[in-house]
Image (cartoon, rainbow, N blue to C red):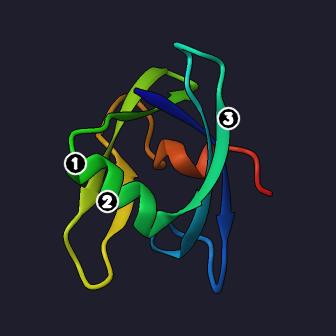
Amino acid sequence: MVYITHVHLSGGNSVQHIEQVQWRDPGNAETGKCSTQLMVNWIDKGGSAWVQGPAGDVEVVVVRTVPPYLKTKPNKTHADNLLWLPRF
């Protein structure tokens, strides 16, 4: 499991425009950066990604469009929790 901690957007301000993510593994404190597509591939292989949002931890899921993109499961906030994250 990893927490996505930062996002990099390109060409707009919605989750569909997230091009890269920074992440942190709470189990070993490892951090990294990858493209959205690499994170999609990692989740597809059984990985689990989460966001620490304003209303608590929220799971990240893959939206199956072309190209696929990431979003958080619905919770008590109106905006997607990925968009609350700092930019890089």
Q: Quick check: marks 2 and 1 in contact, CB under 8 Å?
A: yes
Q: Is residue 18 above or below residue 55?
A: below
Residue at 59% in and 52% down: 83
Q: Amino acid at mark 1?
A: Lys
Residue 41 image label: 2
Is the residue marked by circle 1 packed among few (<14), some (14-19), or many (20+) residues within 10 Å? Answer: few
Q: Amino acid at mark 2?
A: Asn
Q: CA distance from mark 2 to mark 3?
A: 18 Å
Q: Secondary structure at mark 1?
A: loop
Q: CA distance from mark 2 to mark 1?
A: 6 Å
The residue under label 3 is 31
The answer to which image quadrant residue 34 occupies is: bottom right
Q: Secondary structure at mark 3?
A: strand
Residue at 55% in and 25% down: 25
The residue under label 1 is 45
Q: Give residue 24's position: percent from left, percent from top.
A: 61, 31
Q: Amino acid at mark 3?
A: Thr
